[in-house]
Amino acid sequence: MPQKPSNGLRALSLFSGGGGLDLGFDRAGFRHMASFDILPETAAVLKAARPDWEVHAGDNGDVTRIDWKSYRSKIDVLHGGPPCQPFSHAGGRRGAADVRDMIPEFGRAVLAIEPKAFILENVPGLATKKFAPYVKEMILDRLGSRYQIQMLVLEAADFGVPQRRKRVFFVGFRNRAVAKRYKVPSPTHARDLGAGEGLPVVMGARQALGLPDIGLDGLVPTLRSGLTGPRHSTSVVNSATAMRQWEELQIWPNGVAPDRDAASRFAAKNGTFRLSIPDCLLLQGFPADWPIKPPVYKALGLIGNSVAPPMAYAVACSVADVLAGG
């Protein structure tokens, strides 16, 4: 994610979490206006990473309490990833019946602020047949009278992230002519040798972590958030199938340690490599020094719920390219 010069566009972040979208938009040249998230940990991370940023967290970051009209005419792009649990298998897939469903609040902010564009991110489950009526009502119909909306399904590995992680993005433009010029981000990496002519092959997880060559490498399964499933979980495994894939790579994903020193003091099963918080950051596409700190389960919650920054960067660049021309 090479730092791009300022593009003159102003971005507002909702449901900022660990800062995946915020970092991607920052590197793409957007001016950060503010971040909002109900988790106090968000403020600790983002203020440590970017001391000059305006960050609202805890009660002050509760999007249900904000009068967004004060931001009208001050924001070019509104972006956010509302909680995914209402649409994920781990969260029970209860949709609108889940009190954690914040997509209506994202829509309320869009309608009040009237940005030039918005980006809404979520798990691919939102794009399945089960939630088609919900998507039509709460996104396409509700916002479609003012915005031209496209739905994109992107894979993090296509943008250099050593992880199988698919996500859905709804990208809306207020100007119809601008929307017609918009192009879906093109992959920057190939997943296999020979695929994607001229593109570098995405690193395997072992290579990305700097581990010895064992004759086998590949992408890790999707990192599970430490804020879903068992309370205070320090595991990033989301299924028995995923566990087998971790074992093949000789990486131990249970009992994630605060750092590599701590991980080395507690040998993992069969002597495999035990993950630490910085390792999970790398596997998610963050810089290893991004200031997400223990406790481990909260750190894994922020990491696992974040948009992979290189994927956020690709979307941010694609939006900036088209807005800059119109």
Image (cartoon, rainbow, N blue to C red):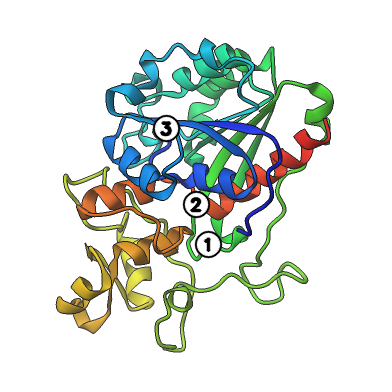
**Residue located 44% across and 58% down the image:** 284
Which mark is drawn over residue 308?
2
Q: State whether residue 2 appears in this view.
A: yes
Q: State whether residue 182 appears in this view.
A: no
Query: Could you say where residue 130 lies in the image, as x and y percent from the top left?
Result: 48, 29
Residue 266 or residue 52, whichever sits in front: 52
Cα distance in 3D space between marks 3 and 2 = 14 Å
Q: Quadrant of residue 36?
A: top left
Graded by Cα atoms within 10 Å as few (under 14), some (14 to 19) or many (20 or more), the crowding at tag 3 reads many
Which corner quadrant holds the C terminus? top right
Query: Could you say where residue 294 lies in the image, as x and y percent from the top left?
Result: 22, 54
Q: Identity of the amino acid at label 2?
A: Ala
Compared across the picture, whether 131 is left or right of 193 comes to: left
Q: Is residue 309 above or below residue 57?
A: below
Q: Quadrant of residue 168?
A: top right
Cα distance in 3D space between marks 3 and 1 = 22 Å
Q: Identity of the amino acid at label 3?
A: Phe
Residues tagged 1 and 2 counted as in contact (Cβ below 8 A): yes
Q: Secondary structure at mark 2?
A: loop
Which mark is drawn over residue 221?
none
Compared across the picture, whether 99 is left or right of 209 comes to: left
Which mark is drawn over residue 15?
3
User: Which of the two discs, 1 and 2, labels the residue nearer the N terminus?
Assistant: 1
Disc 1 marks which residue?
161
Discs 3/1, front? 3
Residue situated furthest front in the rendering: 52
Residue 54 or residue 196, whichever sits in front: 54
Residues tagged 3 and 1 counted as in contact (Cβ below 8 A): no
Graded by Cα atoms within 10 Å as few (under 14), some (14 to 19) or many (20 or more), the crowding at tag 1 reads many
